[in-house]
Amino acid sequence: MSDRVLMCGNEAMAESAIQAGLDAYFGYPITPQNEVTAYMSKRMAEEKRVFIQSESELAAINMVFGAAATGKRTMTSSSSPGISLMQEGISYLAAAELPCVIVNVMRGGPGLGNIAPSQGDYFQSVKGGGHGDYHCIVFGPSGVQEFADIMPLAFDLADKYRIPAIILADGIIGQMMEPVVIPTNSKLTTQNLKLPKKDWALTGADGRKQNIVRSLWLAEGAVEQHNYDLQAKYRQIEKNETRCEQSDVDDADIIIVAYGICARIARRAAQQAREQGIKVGCIRPITLWPFPSEQISKIADKSPIFLVVEMSCGQMVEDVRLAVAGKSPVVFWGRPGGGIPTVEKVLEKIEQLVTRASSPCLHGQDGRATKK
Amino acid sequence: MAGKIKIDIERCKGCTLCVTVCPNNVITISEKSNSKGYFPAQSTGPDCTGCTNCAIVCPDCAIEVYRDKAGSDKIDIKSVNPVKKNKVNNLARESK
Amino acid sequence: MMQTVFKRTPTLKDCPTHYCPGCGHGIAHRLVSEVIDELGIHGRTIGIAPVGCAVLAYDYFDVDMIEVAHGRAPAVATGMKRTNPDKIVFSYQGDGDLAAIGTAEIIHAAHRAEQLTVVFINNAVFGMTGGQMAPTTMLGQITATTPQGRQADGQGYPLNVSELLAVLPGTIYVERCGLCSPAHIRKAKAALKHAFELQINNAKGLSLVELLSPCPTYWRLSSPDAMLYIQNEMTKVFPLGRLKG
């Protein structure tokens, strides 16, 4: 399918995964990603590949664990409460170094929350919601096209580094309909990317030594060393796979940092601010882990005000603060629990910052999330 | 004897299951411990028929069984009741 | 001239095990290994180790093995078998793994008629963590978490997993055996062989063999007495025999 078609994000992502060679999908219904399970049930049967509606998200992530261990391309999708159930499995996947893709179409939380879009699971995915020192590669697509484009990249990087890849979408990205061209030749993957052979996979010990997929080592120092090995891998990924988009940052007095749908809202607000003569630029992290700390730090040398906009009470803002390391003020504005920032409101915040910036006693103060 | 067993002394944990399932009292427990501190089983009796009861019940696969080719087709197993000696203790632990 | 009539089978690694003296796991491991070798499926078998005393089963079974989260084996097995239908996938689970935390997974794998072979070791106690009550602990049995002995009121009755699963259309073979005498152990091996053969023959459904297994350490019995306990007491609550198939 390489025509330009109108599709909702969830379905575009699913089709792209299929085109990227998905062998098995396991998932459980939860709003706002039910389009994925329905689409997969139909298309995977057409392609004669594996689809299972599992009995729970807990089962789904473990089915992923099994298929991944045999070297297959596999994924699951869910939304925030279901992703919470998967945390045990994600920790095991990261520890056993199994490649897979997990899509979180975020909704309002905590708890059962609501079915409106949110970005409240940044901590959970980027800082590790499961136990132990581990990371997954985390992407934050900002539209239907990017949601689709990211899938072959996610599978390739997962295979290359033997690591789970998490796609943090939200209810808007999942359900909005936009024109999209489904990638069928992995346009976004690195040129001549040679993926390593999966000689660790469980394929039957015919004519070779047994393979073991595990995450328990009881010998003294073994898990400690395993952690050091994982960390070395993570440093490699940080060095090679950080992705972010910058616009109008060179002369900007205010830089909005946002990902996902917030990035598009921010971009529109920035454009409108420029029309008013306010110099606003945008940084849009595409990988949330590895986080574009270096890029942000470099821009912070010029001391703009950073305005971080999220659909949460402030999660990515902490990573921005770490990257800025006190060189510049970092201000947060957001809406949790399914609230969606509007262009008008973001512009209002920009205008407030301009007013405050010209008042010397307010330099360096941070904002906190407040009621709308 | 029609049969013979070989017990891996270092592998044996002295659980005594083989002793109790042997129909011909071939096996006893050694008074000398192995390097792990277990008192292993040993083949001491002359009447081994190679019935393999001991090997089948051994949780550590510590026993190999051999049988004399001639006349070994019929095994004269006097009993397949595994436990002749011990009674079942009440599972409730006695209070101290 | 002596011929060998019993020796270690190749799939059972030649190494000491960490299991207690008299533990049923050693017997069960050997039986499964013998079945794998006799059926000639070593090269295409993948086994799943549980969380429990048998967590290190991959050190003993010389086939491709995976270690999974507590109770999740049937879901992992589903993922493996559905994507690799030509492989023989078996899970090896204790009573905590299968009948406590993993109840949903085993029921749904059976319910979906996944083509799997499940070896269920029932020793009526959580061994690895120090002898706590398991779903299959007998009434009156004293454990680390039932110091007065298991009471039906508040702790429920022992769980009959095989009977539960036999009801589901997706299970095609369920048998309960005892690792409690040479004769019983020979029968257990035949049951295990049948359970693996069904998968080899592409039978459409899940096979489960429940093995009543001795735990001398946490039953506070000698090894022979533990086997007697299975014969005389456990079989009253967990009757032996073929429940389905």
Image: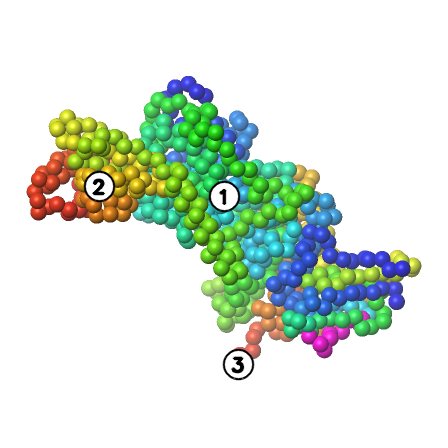
Residue at the image position 19 percent from the left and 28 percent from the top: A271
Please, what is the three-letter code of the amino acid marked with disc 3? Lys
Residue A77 x, y percent position in the rendering: 42, 38
Residue A265 location, quadrant: top left
* Disc with the residue nearer the chain's start (2 vs 1): 1
Residue C216 location, quadrant: bottom right
Q: Are marks 2 and 3 on the same chain?
A: no
Give the labeled residue for mark 1. Answer: A98
Q: Quadrant of the N terminus of chain C?
A: bottom right
> How many tags in the picture?
3
List the single residue furthest toward the right: B70
Residue at the image position 52 percent from the left and 56 percent from the top: A217
- Distance Cα–Cα, label 3 vs label 1: 51 Å
Give the labeled residue for mark 2. Answer: A301
Q: Is A195 on the left-hand or right-hand side of B77?
A: left
Q: Nearer the viewer, mark 2 or mark 1?
A: 2
Q: Is residue A40 visible?
A: no
Local packing at callout 1 (Cα closer than 10 Å; few below 14, some 14-19, many 20+) is many
Q: Which residues are magenta?
A: B25-33
Give the labeled residue for mark 3. Answer: B96
Chain at numbered mark 1: A
